[in-house]
Image: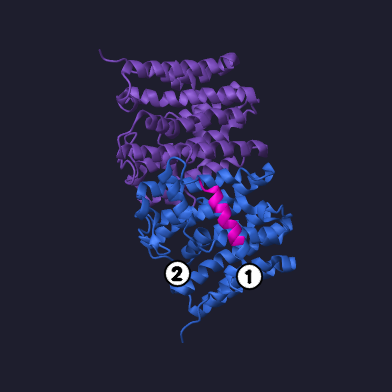
Chain colours: A purple, B blue
Amino acid sequence: MSYEDVFKDDLEFLDRALHEFLPSAEIYPQTLHQAMRYAVLGGGKRFRPVMVLAACETLGGTRQQAVFPAVALEFIHCYSLVQDDLPALDNDDLRRGQPTCHRKYGEATALLASDGLLTLAFELLARVKPAERAVQLVAEISTAAGTCGMIGGQSADLEAVSKAPDSALLDFVNIHKTGKLIKASAVSGALAAGADPESLRRIERYGESVGLAFQCVDDLQDGDGYLRYMTYGELNEKTRTLLKNARQEVAIFGAQAAKLVFLADFLEQRIPVKAT
Amino acid sequence: MSYEDVFKDDLEFLDRALHEFLPSAEIYPQTLHQAMRYAVLGGGKRFRPVMVLAACETLGGTRQQAVFPAVALEFIHCYSLVQDDLPALDNDDLRRGQPTCHRKYGEATALLASDGLLTLAFELLARVKPAERAVQLVAEISTAAGTCGMIGGQSADLEAVSKAPDSALLDFVNIHKTGKLIKASAVSGALAAGADPESLRRIERYGESVGLAFQCVDDLQDGDGYLRYMTYGELNEKTRTLLKNARQEVAIFGAQAAKLVFLADFLEQRIPVKAT
């Protein structure tokens, strides 16, 4: 079964939710809202919000319980992509084969659109009931997106470019820039389902392992990053161990964790076979 | 009494709180955290957080109850200043006589620092107790900072530059770009104090009037903005009426509203006497 088959209903549900919670392109200022929609609705695997739904389902929650954190995390992911592409950072002209947001709407509007997405993420989280759960989600996601999370990772990444990076710096970048938001996706799904502390801790460790494995798979595909410090064989083994640990953490939930297990399998299948 | 005299204790309290809630410059990634501190600790009137404290005091709340929204609103104000100064927007080299954040730390770090401030604002709001109050504050402040608030005003401002603006567009820009965050400051102070609905509504109208008057005073000082559509006399009268209305809204609270009244007086005293 492909990713698209396994998550067909989830992806359709998310697509509707993203459309619904983005400001309409008819609302003033239209260009700003169009740029936000362009940044989000241009496709992508939706790995993070799918993981939110999967974690929530694992603990007996419904999609509707998970919809606000799922959409919020995708908005935050997209805001980070828009900013990554800006001239001050990676200066990219294309993303997924289309002009990047600032190439299409100009730098100023792209920047404001990215701000709008980050801000809207928190506006949506405030709509979660009960209030205690909303606050848990705001705390978890703001920390994961902040300077001790994703933003900190991006900043460390800038440093890594300007000086000879070592493997400790690379670990920091990967855990923070990519890993923290993926871990927060798993945790948010669990929080949305009202997880007990022990289940929450399991899902947290699952998210931590998958978050780091996500970046390792990228490096194995691109031949970069960790492969500057490890052999292919070492990184291959590290990645498979992380994914195995992730699956073991959620094995206790049986069939209800099928989608979380599939997400780990999906990453493992993307590990390229090394040309010999 | 000067602004600094009236708010001496509040400003000292805020200064300590801003120092405390900003990430330490010793924490990795240091440059990022230094840039955030630079963006916030370089001075300024602290008009918004002072208003949060004043509104909270008016309704019988303590400074400690108001500290998280006060600091959060100042962080959001500072994030907007850092971004305003960027080359893609106003391209300013100086702010308050010092190099702007991107001139000192580079564009990429300045951008990440501004993101860090916005994100940290919500992290702090999640610490407000009880949870219901935290959620009210996240909802109020995210809406005021978002595309139907400050970001929307900035976007409309870009449009106003590129085409002949009319007075309706100017109203939109001023109400949204400046006014919404000032209104949110008053409302947040009231929410932090656990305001009843009728008091909250009064404080809201106060904040709305002062927020718009704030921009009018700027225009009277700069000879720009509204003065392209109104005579000095008309804008002078409009501004004084707004401030009078603001004071009337809070008159019912008597001496407890003294600081809110002073903030309106303070703006009125800044209206320049027209050279005749």
Looking at the rendered structure, the secondary structure element under dot 1 is: helix
x 37%, y 37%: residue: A157
Amino acid at dot 2: Gly
The reply, left or right, for residue A70 in relation to residue B82 is: right
The reply, left or right, for residue A120 in relation to residue A89 is: right
Does the magenta-highlighted stretch encompass residue B87? no
Q: Quadrant of residue A265?
A: top left
Crowding near pointer 1: few (<14 within 10 Å), some, many (20+)?
Answer: some
Q: Main secondary structure of the magenta part?
A: helix
Of residues B251 and A215, which is closer to you in this image?
A215
Residue A46 in view in this figure:
yes
Question: Could you confirm whether marks 2 and 1 are on the same chain?
Answer: yes
Q: Which residue is mark 1?
A: B262
Foreground disc of the pair 2, 1: 1
Question: Could you say which disc has been placed on residue B225 in the image?
Answer: 2
Boundaries of the magenta span: B10-23
The reply, left or right, for residue B220 in relation to residue B264 is: left
Amino acid at dot 1: Phe
Of residues B258 and A124, which is closer to you in this image?
B258
Q: Position of residue B63 (x, y in %)?
A: 66, 55
x 48%, y 55%: residue: B40
x 54%, y 77%: residue: B236
x 55%, y 27%: residue: A53
Q: Chain of mark 2?
A: B
